[in-house]
Image: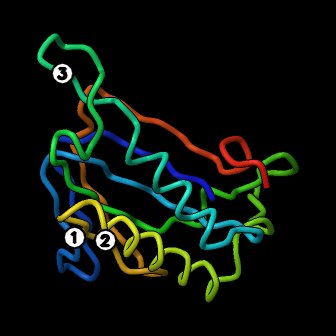
Amino acid sequence: MRLVIQRVSHASVTVDGEITGKIGRGFLVLLGAGSDDTEEIAEKMADKMLRLRIFADENDKTNLSVTDVKGELLIVSQFTLYADCRKGNRPSFIKAGDPAKANELYEHFKEYCKETIPVVESGIFGADMKVELCNDGPFTIVLDSDEIIKK
């Protein structure tokens, strides 16, 4: 599983002209599920993300997590995080998860996050989405389960 986590002051996602998710301060999370991912991996990745201390404390040091600041989450599926561009000019997505399985993991990840974070918004899996955000910092972190979790 791959996550691109952006600390935002606000973010939204729109599908067919309708806002499907909108948050204030928190994380915009782009989530890509790989072919070998499981619910256990999704939960471990969510736990890691929720514990990241990338919000400033009273001394302006990055010591607070999204839960500490009562932040919100906007989670957007993005299979293109598994693009392999090593050969040629057209990316290969062979390592991206099967769409049905990837959608299940995406939904599981969102529900798991809702156990900790009161506001969890999302896009629509597989839809053509327009994402708007104000990256706060900017502060962007990339988490890859191949590096974070021993499979």
Query: In this rendering, would 49 be left or right of 59?
Result: right
As displayed, is residue 134 above or below residue 110?
Answer: above
SS for dot 2: strand
Task: Write the residue at 45% across / 57% down.
Answer: 30
Q: Nearer the viewer, residue 33 or 54?
A: 54
Query: In this rendering, would 46 be left or right of 21?
Result: right
Quarter holding the N terminus is bottom right
| Amino acid type, callout 2 | Ser
Query: In this rendering, would 150 be left or right of 21?
Result: right
CA gap, disc 3 and disc 1? 27 Å
Residue 21, disc? 1
Q: Nearer the viewer, residue 65 or 132?
A: 65
Which residue is label 2 attached to? 122
Q: Nearer the viewer, residue 47 or 91?
A: 47
Task: Write the residue at 79% across / 55% down.
Answer: 151
Q: Position of residue 38 (x, y in %)?
A: 67, 72
- Give whichever of discs 2 and 1 has the lower sequence position: 1
